[in-house]
Amino acid sequence: MKEIRAICRPDRLYELRRALRAIPGFPGLTVLEAKGFSAPVLIDNPSLKEALTDFTGKVMLCTLVADDMVDSITDVIMREGRTGQIGDGLIWVLPVESARRIRDGSNL
């Protein structure tokens, strides 16, 4: 089992949710409001540097998935979250040792 986390633009959330729901067996999604900024050394346009190095509203997506779903889910996040501009976000995948449903104590 893996946890997929992604930071993306809030205006991409509707399309991301629609596309993720279309994946057979998609287990669900937690969305958190987040703020962040890009690394100043990565921005070579001085007029963008001021805007993109201040805290900007983002969303963090979190989901727990079976190992064999990681590629399809990260591909959807990449496709639907991409605008081609600095600040599109980041995806990372973490191993999960165990997870249990609070409602009934069952293992995921």
Image (cartoon, helix red, strand yellow):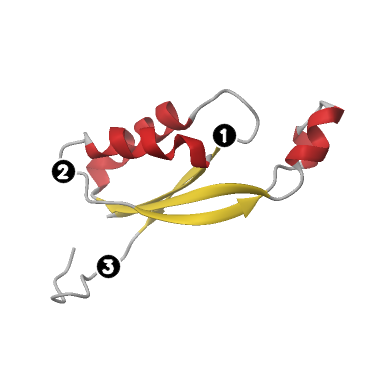
Q: Position of residue 33 (x, y in %)?
A: 51, 55
Q: CA distance from mark 3 to mark 1?
A: 31 Å
Of residues 35 and 69, the one drawn nearer to the viewer in this rendering: 35
Kindly state the secondary structure of the residue where label 3 is placed: loop
Kindly state the secondary structure of the residue where label 1 is placed: loop
* Residue at the (33%, 61%) spot, across then down: 96
Q: Earlier in the sequence, mark 3 or mark 1?
A: 1
Q: Position of residue 44 (x, y in %)?
A: 81, 27
Contact, CB < 8 Å: mark 2 with mark 3?
Answer: no
Query: Mark 2 — residue?
Result: 25
Q: Earlier in the sequence, mark 1 or mark 2?
A: 2
Q: Is residue 35 above or below residue 44?
A: below
Query: Mark 3 — residue?
Result: 98
* Residue at the (81%, 35%) spot, across then down: 49
Query: Between tags 3 and 1, which lies in front?
Result: 1
Left/right placement of residue 48 relative to residue 71 reads right
Dot 3 amino acid type = Ser
Query: Mark 1 — residue?
Result: 88
Left/right placement of residue 62 relative to residue 69 reads right
Left/right placement of residue 36 relative to residue 47 reads left
Packing grade of label 3 (10 A; few <14, some 14-19, many >=20) is: few
Kindly state the secondary structure of the residue where label 2 is placed: loop
Q: CA distance from mark 2 to mark 3?
A: 19 Å
Dot 2 amino acid type = Gly
Packing grade of label 1 (10 A; few <14, some 14-19, many >=20) is: some
Dot 1 amino acid type = Asp
Q: Is residue 48 visible?
A: yes
Packing grade of label 2 (10 A; few <14, some 14-19, many >=20) is: few
Contact, CB < 8 Å: mark 1 with mark 2?
Answer: no
Q: Position of residue 75 (x, y in %)?
A: 37, 31
Of residues 81 and 1, the one drawn nearer to the viewer in this rendering: 81
Q: Quadrant of residue 88?
A: top right
